[in-house]
Image (cartoon, helix red, strand yellow):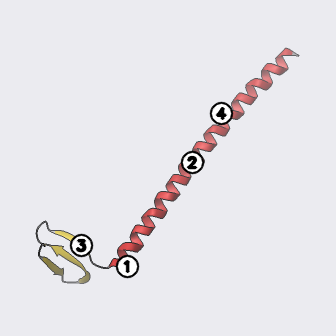
């Protein structure tokens, strides 16, 4: 187990003396942050899916326009 030193002005953090990393010891804050990150990833994924669907709809509209032009040209 590595030695840890308390951070003077913040009791929720300690410094791992083996690698000098600052670690958060407030488990509820860490869990809250992790949940927020999950929500942000979901929002980004949803946004990407919506943009993909918009692109597909645009392609379908272009194809329908070509089909209508071809059908009207046959008349």
For marks 2 and 3, the one nearer the N-term is: 3
Q: Secondary structure at mark 4?
A: helix
From the viewer's perspective, tell me whether residue 29 is left or right of residue 12: right
The Cα–Cα distance between marks 3 and 4, rounded to whole angstroms, is 50 Å
Kindly identify which residue carries mark 3.
23
Question: Extreme front residue here?
Answer: 1
Frontmost of labels 3 and 4 is 3
Q: CA distance from mark 2 to mark 4?
A: 15 Å
> The C terminus lies in which quarter of the figure?
top right
When the figure is inspected, residue 38 is found, relative to residue 45, above or below; the finding is below
Q: Which residue in the structure is indicated by mark 4?
A: 59
Say which label, 2 or 4, has the lower sequence index. 2
Residue denoted by label 2: 49
Q: Which mark is residue 28?
A: 1
What residue is at 47 percent from the left and 61 percent from the top? 40
The spot of residue 11 in percent (x, y) is 25, 84
21 over 45 or under it: above or below? below
Whole-number angstrom distance, CA of label 1 to CA of label 3: 14 Å
First in sequence: mark 3 vs mark 4: 3
Closer to the chain start, of discs 1 and 4, is: 1
Farthest residue toward the right? 75
- Give the CA distance from mark 2 to mark 1: 32 Å
Return the x and y of residue 35 as percentages of the image width and height.
44, 68
Cβ–Cβ under 8 Å for marks 3 and 4: no
How packed mark 3 is, by other alpha carbons closer than 10 Å (few <14, some 14-19, many 20 or more), is some
Q: Nearer the viewer, mark 1 or mark 4?
A: 1
Q: Secondary structure at mark 3?
A: strand
Q: How many marks?
A: 4
């Amino acid at each position: 187990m590595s030695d840890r030193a308390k951070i003077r002005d913040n009791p929720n953090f300690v410094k791992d003396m083996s690698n000098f990393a600052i670690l958060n010891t407030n488990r509820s804050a860490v869990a809250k942050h992790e949940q927020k990150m999950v929500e942000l990833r979901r929002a980004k994924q949803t946004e990407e899916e919506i943009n993909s669907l918009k692109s597909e709809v645009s392609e379908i509209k272009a194809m329908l326009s070509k089909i209508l032009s071809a059908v009207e040209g046959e008349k």
